[in-house]
Image (cartoon, grey):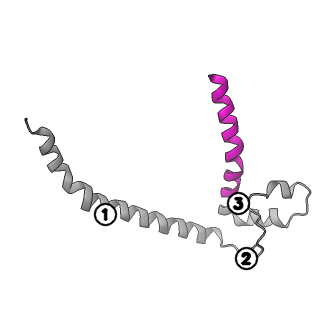
Amino acid sequence: TDQRILAFLKAAFVFVCPELLAIVLFILPWIRNIVEEADFWPMPWITWWFHTRIFVGRGVREGPVSNIKYGLFWLAVLASKFAFSYILQIKPLIEPTRALLNMKG
């Protein structure tokens, strides 16, 4: 069973590596620009997952500050959604649920 777990972890690592590299290249767009503009033979092998056949908009990217602002915006949206959901939906039901669970018979 240990061999199966190791094989699974190796396969997961092979799948996750390009995704992690794509995340790094998304966060640091200047590295992605360098990689895309490089005329070095292994670059097509490295960049196969983020090159599409559609060339419209290729090379047009926001800077890291804009990416951070965008991420913080969605983090604030999700945090406020979860806070309001808890306050308006879950918190009012805690006491009645406890009362139901403590009822005898």
Residue at 26 percent of width and 55 percent of height: 90
Secondary structure state at the residue bearing disc 1: helix
- Residues 28 and 96: in front is 96
Residue with the mark numbered 1: 84
Residue with the mark numbered 3: 25
Residue with the mark numbered 2: 57
Q: Label 3 amino acid? A: Leu
Front label number (3 vs 1):
1
**Alpha carbon distance from label 3 to label 2:** 16 Å
Q: Which residues are magenta?
A: 1-25
* Place of residue 66 in the rendered image (x, y in percent of width and height, measured from the top left): 59, 72
Q: Is residue 8 magenta?
A: yes
* Place of residue 87 in the rendered image (x, y in percent of width and height, measured from the top left): 26, 60
**Any mark on residue 16, and which?**
none
Secondary structure state at the residue bearing disc 3: helix
Secondary structure state at the residue bearing disc 2: loop
Q: Give the residue at the far front of this rendering.
A: 105
